[in-house]
Image: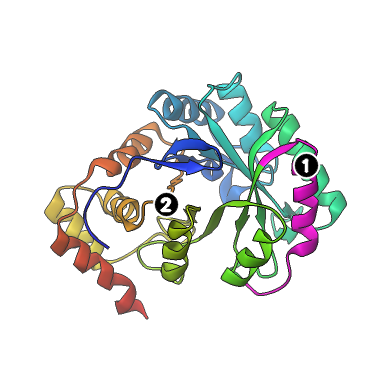
């Protein structure tokens, strides 16, 4: 990886989006369950994101559930022509806020219609199939049955493009035999780099890679090296972690989430942060030191 700045845009299906987008997960209540503490603040963040040039928002109707999509609709509908909203299906929430598989034809079809209704759309730009063989990370198993359901809904005109989330390289290959795959959304960040080879392979194929938990997620990134680099650059550790990802590959689309307008602007500024080669080398060693 070099410190050379990458292009500010990448194609997501047939749409060019800015590589630094916004993830709506944090707009729901604690544990991504229930309503936000301050709905007005959530609406303000969404509106400010789009006003600041963000044209890629990542969401799901199982955030809340139904909460984030309804907030997006209230804040932004009717949507700007260049705004791409990506959602995901394949999971549901239990009454105890647990994350459960929802892979049946009925569940997937209902999820697509719920997303359409709650977002106020006639067609969904991109729908990711969130594979749930293991909620904590990718696990092998055939995705033919659930992905065929999404492919059929795509043929019906309810979905423009299909992506995959929480998947292995084998599942991506299987998926491509069923329908075009425009993006892969997996866990990846400065310290969690199991997908290094996969990212490079997808880049060669022109496929977007969207790292979820780019800042660590429920266990925020903690690294003395990251803190030291941030101090030397006069930036925050979060900005440095995002800047490193931004330069990791031209096909990486970032979706950091926040419920704060101030944090939103700080995140977006990471795209302009210069990382000297020696600092990149230091950051590259973070994952190795944890293995």
Q: How many marks?
A: 2
Query: Residue 249 falls in which quadrant of the image?
Result: bottom left
Q: Which of the image's four quarters has the N terminus?
A: bottom left
Binning the other alpha carbons within 10 Å of mark 2 as few (below 14), some (14 to 19) or many (20 upward) gives many
Residue 107 in percent (x, y) is at 83, 50
Q: Write the residue at 18% across / 59% down.
A: 229
- Residue 251 visible in the current orientation: yes
Front-lying residue, 90 or 144: 144
Side of 271 relative to 21 (left or right):
left
Query: Residue 200 falls in which quadrant of the image?
Result: bottom left
Residue 78 in percent (x, y) is at 60, 18
Front-lying residue, 184 or 203: 203
- Give the residues drawn in magenta, as a range: 139-160
Distance from Cα at disc 1 to Cα at disc 2: 26 Å
Residue 290 in percent (x, y) is at 35, 77
Helix, strand or loop at mark 1: helix
Side of 86 relative to 218 (left or right):
right
Q: Which of the image's four quarters has the C terminus?
A: bottom left
Binning the other alpha carbons within 10 Å of mark 1 as few (below 14), some (14 to 19) or many (20 upward) gives few
Q: Is residue 159 magenta?
A: yes
Helix, strand or loop at mark 2: loop
Q: Is residue 284 above or below residue 130?
A: below
Badge number at residue 251? 2
Q: Is residue 106 above or below residue 204?
A: above
Residue 254 in percent (x, y) is at 42, 47
Side of 27 relative to 194 (left or right):
right
Q: Is residue 111 above or below residue 285?
A: above
Q: Of all residues shown, which one is farthest toward the bottom?
A: 291
Circle 1 residue: 155
């Amino acid at each position: 990886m070099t410190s050379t700045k990458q292009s500010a845009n990448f194609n997501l299906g047939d749409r060019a989006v800015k590589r630094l987008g916004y993830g709506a997960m944090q707009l729901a209540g604690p544990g991504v369950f229930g309503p936000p503490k301050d709905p007005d603040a959530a609406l303000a963040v969404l509106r400010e994101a789009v006003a600041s040039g963000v044209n890629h928002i990542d969401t799901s109707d199982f955030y809340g559930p139904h909460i984030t999509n309804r907030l997006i609709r209230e804040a932004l509908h009717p949507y700007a022509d260049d705004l791409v909203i990506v959602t995901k299906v394949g999971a549901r929430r239990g009454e105890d806020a647990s994350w459960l598989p929802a892979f049946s034809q009925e569940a997937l079809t209902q999820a697509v219609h719920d997303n359409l209704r709650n977002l106020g759309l006639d067609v969904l730009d991109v729908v990711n199939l969130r594979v749930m063989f293991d909620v904590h990370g990718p696990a092998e198993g055939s995705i033919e049955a659930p992905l065929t359901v999404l492919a059929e809904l795509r043929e019906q005109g309810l979905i423009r493009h299909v992506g995959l989330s929480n998947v292995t390289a084998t599942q991506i290959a299987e998926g491509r035999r069923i329908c075009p795959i425009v993006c892969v959304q997996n866990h990846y960040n400065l310290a969690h780099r199991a997908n290094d080879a996969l990212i490079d392979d997808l880049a060669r194929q022109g496929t977007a890679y969207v790292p979820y938990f780019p800042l660590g997620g429920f266990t925020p990134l903690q690294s003395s090296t990251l803190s030291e680099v941030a101090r030397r650059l006069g930036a925050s550790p979060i900005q440095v972690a995002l800047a490193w990802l931004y330069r990791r590959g031209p096909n990486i689309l970032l979706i950091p989430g926040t419920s704060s307008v101030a944090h939103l602007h700080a995140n977006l500024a990471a795209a302009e942060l210069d990382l000297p080669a020696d600092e990149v080398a230091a950051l590259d060693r973070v994952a190795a030191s944890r293995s």
